[in-house]
């Protein structure tokens, strides 16, 4: 394994943690309404499910790049 792949994974993980932290801060400070928090949570879950379905696709797994 090349060290650049590990460094890229670390960078993406760090960026994900920063984005999730910023989103949590936004939700707790600006959107104190329960309906808004529930809507954002549902959108995040929906996007996560779609990305998981896409990453498990046969076309994605057969790509020689991966």
Image (tube, rainbow, N blue to C red):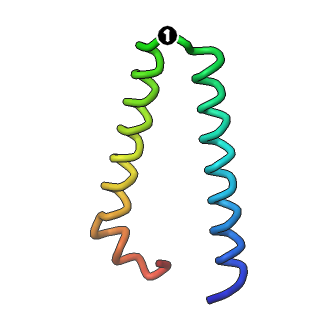
Q: Quadrant of residue 46?
A: top left
Give the farthest residue toward the bottom.
Answer: 1
Q: Is residue 48 left or right of residue 29?
A: left
> Quarter of the image containing the N terminus?
bottom right
> What residue sits 71% from the left and 73% below the top?
7
> Tag 1: Cα neighbours inside 10 Å, few (<14), some, or many (≥20)?
few
The reply, left or right, for residue 46 in relation to residue 19 is left
Quadrant position of residue 10: bottom right
Q: Secondary structure at mark 1?
A: loop
- Residue drawn 65% across and 77% down? 5
- How many numbered circles are shown? 1
Among the 4 quarters of the image, the one containing residue 55: bottom left
Q: Position of residue 17 (x, y in %)?
A: 64, 49
**Residue sitting at the far top:** 33
Instruction: Locate residue 27 relative to residue 22 in the image: left or right.
Output: left
* Residue wearing tag 1: 33
Instruction: Residue lying at the far left in this picture: please name it.
Output: 58
Image location (x, y in percent) of residue 43: 41, 31
């Amino acid at each position: 394994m090349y060290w650049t792949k590990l460094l890229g994974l670390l960078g993406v993980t760090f960026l994900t943690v920063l984005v999730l932290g910023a989103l949590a801060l936004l939700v707790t400070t600006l959107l104190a309404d329960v309906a808004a928090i529930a809507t954002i949570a549902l959108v995040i879950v929906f996007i996560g499910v779609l990305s998981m379905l896409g990453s498990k696709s046969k076309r994605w797994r057969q790509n020689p790049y991966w």
